[in-house]
Image: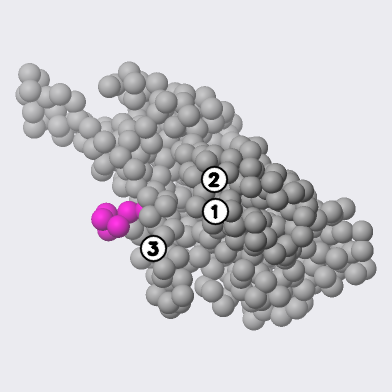
Amino acid sequence: MELLEYQVKEWFGKIGIPVLPSQRIDHPTDLKRLKIPYPIVLKSQVYTGERAKAGGVRFVETTIDAIAAAQTIFNLPIWGELPEVILGESQYIGEKEFYLAVVLDTAVCRPVLLGGTEADIDWESPGQKMHHVVVEQEFSAFYARRLALKMGLRGKLIQSVSSVVDKMYQLFIQKDLDLVEISPLSVNASGEVMALNGKVSINERAIGRHPDLEEIAVKTANRHGRSTINPQLGNWDGLELHGKIGILANGTGSMMATLDLVTSAGGKPGSCLNLRHALLTDVSPTTFCDRLAKGLNFLAADKSVQVILLNLIGGVTETKEVVQIISNFMQQDNREVQSASVACSTKTRRGHHFPRLVVRIAGSEFAAAQKLLGRLNTKPDALIVLENLDEAVATSVSFTKRDG
């Protein structure tokens, strides 16, 4: 479960992470009673990304311009979502921007500190510019300072950035979070740091331990369309939809981006599952392959799903194991078709339900995965492997339109 930016900024301010003066705007007329000085920036408060590109971020210098901009933002859907709230915030002139995060790595069951020298780095696909420190024992300032040094920071920045990381970790522990992210952490000419944008993901297993989060959780679930009926999907980090294309991805961002692309291409998304995190009911560590096998079987059991679109980015460290999981899944398809053939006569059999599988793998592992998957003995068009996401989406949509 994620929070909106204005909620994140409230948490940041309370724990001591520097944030700009801001005000929640529930209606354009609230700007007549603005308590922060102009110029300001108005930000649409939605759960999807790419607000600026969609026109959901506006810079204004007067009350008249602010009211007009707010009216536009309140009526501007971003990936189909209209904001209920706008954040009004002071403008800030920075000279440098960094990326910081504290994330729960379910693979090693430890918190990890992340730091990047650029603000637009995605923690789900870290490269050479992303640095990490695993918190292996009880947390201390040593870990935060170590990250700052690995980022190549010098002088006053070492202390100021490590202090922010320290507070981010405190928040991470206090609220039982999966992720605390600042992107960007801006630095002005005086060397002062400021969290210009932030993201928080709450561990849903822990909501019961924090009564103050229950009301937020209900509202967030309703806005996301999270299942309150299906007990199996209720254990996943995902969305329950009833379209023809089920989506599996190894990250919340990639899952939501894939859903948006399928919708834009004229497809009807089915349930979407994030394979990065363990199920809420898992009490012991699980591997990505464990979650992949469960996810494939879960979507295959949904009779409305005709195609499963698997989007893997940011590196697949267990390429051979992933291929084996897919191979086992496709063999299950063959066994069930044979079973259906025995049970039904030729005249009455209409075809056993089993979804096609479109696999998109981006990164250095694509060639190896494509070669291994190409050796699998499957029915024509039962398994398609592609590197380009747009092509994978178009292929998935075309299958559903062709199959009806």
Between the C-alphas of marks 2 and 1, the distance is: 8 Å
- Ranked by sequence position, the earlier of labels 1 and 3 is 1
Give the SS element for disc 3: helix
Q: Amino acid at mark 2?
A: Phe
Residue drawn at (12%, 24%), measured in percent from left and top? Answer: 349
Residue drawn at (70%, 57%), measured in percent from left and top? Answer: 89
Circles 2, 1 touching at the beta carbon (< 8 Å): yes
Q: Report the residue marked by disc 2.
A: 74
Q: Is residue 19 left or right of residue 264?
A: right
**Dominant secondary structure (helix, strand or loop) of the stretch shown in magenta:** loop
Residue drawn at (43%, 55%), measured in percent from left and top? Answer: 237
Q: Report the residue marked by disc 3.
A: 218
- Ranked by sequence position, the earlier of labels 2 and 1 is 1
Give the SS element for disc 1: loop
Position in image of residue 5 (x %, y %): 60, 58
The stretch of residues the image draws in magenta is 226-232
Position in image of residue 84 (x %, y %): 50, 52
Residue 228 belongs to the span the image colors magenta:
yes
Between the C-alphas of marks 2 and 3, the distance is: 22 Å
Circles 2, 3 touching at the beta carbon (< 8 Å): no
